[in-house]
Amino acid sequence: MNAGLAPIRDAKTILLTTYKRDGTAVATPVSVAFDGERAFFRSYHKAWKTKRLRHDPAVQAAPATLRGKPTGPAIRARATLLDGEQAHVAARALARRHRILQAILVPAAHRLMRYRTMHYELVPQ
């Protein structure tokens, strides 16, 4: 197992901290899933966190409750935007780990709202 991901390995939700242009940290709870040694999360193209990630892919990720209360130590990572087959790997991993939320509800909401789904991989720093 990737030792860098160990603190979040058992989490279903992480508190993802992204950074504004002025350096201000913004924490958001997101669902996380794993495929082997890789960790994934998703967002949509109009989300503020997606815009922050475009500018600065450095993040911190800590295991958390659904409401975003941290339950363990944070790791430093880089959020890498995926496309093509790699995005499909991430989508399948999320659907397997979160059968209702990420397999049905989130994709349906994204289609309904005409959002473009963005899949990211967390790469420990």
Image (tube, helix red, strand yellow):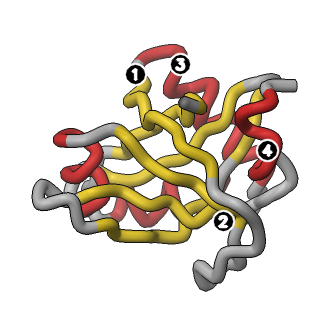
Q: Are marks 1 and 3 in contact (CB under 8 Å)?
A: yes
Three-letter code, disc 4: Arg
Nearer-N-terminus badge (3/4): 3
Q: Position of residue 44 (x, y in %)?
A: 33, 53
Image quarter of residue 76: top right
Q: How far is disc 1 from disc 4 in space, using C-alphas?
A: 19 Å
Q: Identify the element where label 4 is drawn.
A: helix
Q: Quadrant of the C terminus?
A: top right
Q: What residue lies at 37% left-to-right and 41% top-to-bottom?
A: 58
Q: Residue at x 64, y 60 (%)?
A: 62
Q: Pointer 1: residues within 10 angstroms few (<14), some, or many (20+)? A: few
Residue 122 to residue 85: above or below? below
**Mark 2 vs 3: CB contact within 8 A:** no
Q: In the image, what residue type sits under mark 2?
A: Leu
Mark 2 and mark 1: Cα distance apart in space: 21 Å
Q: Of label 2 and label 3, which has the lower sequence position?
A: 3
Q: Which residue is mark 2?
A: 101
Tell me the kind of residue under disc 3: Gln
The residue wearing badge 1 is 83
Asked if the residues shown at circle 3 and circle 4 are in contact, with their CB atoms under 8 angstroms apart, the answer is no
Q: What residue is shown with label 3? A: 86
x and y, in percent, of residue 46 in the image: 20, 57
Task: Give the SS element for disc 2.
Answer: helix
Q: CA distance from mark 2 to mark 4?
A: 10 Å
Residue 121 place in picture, x, y as percent: 53, 32
Looking at the rendered structure, the secondary structure element under dot 1 is loop
85 to the left or right of 7: left
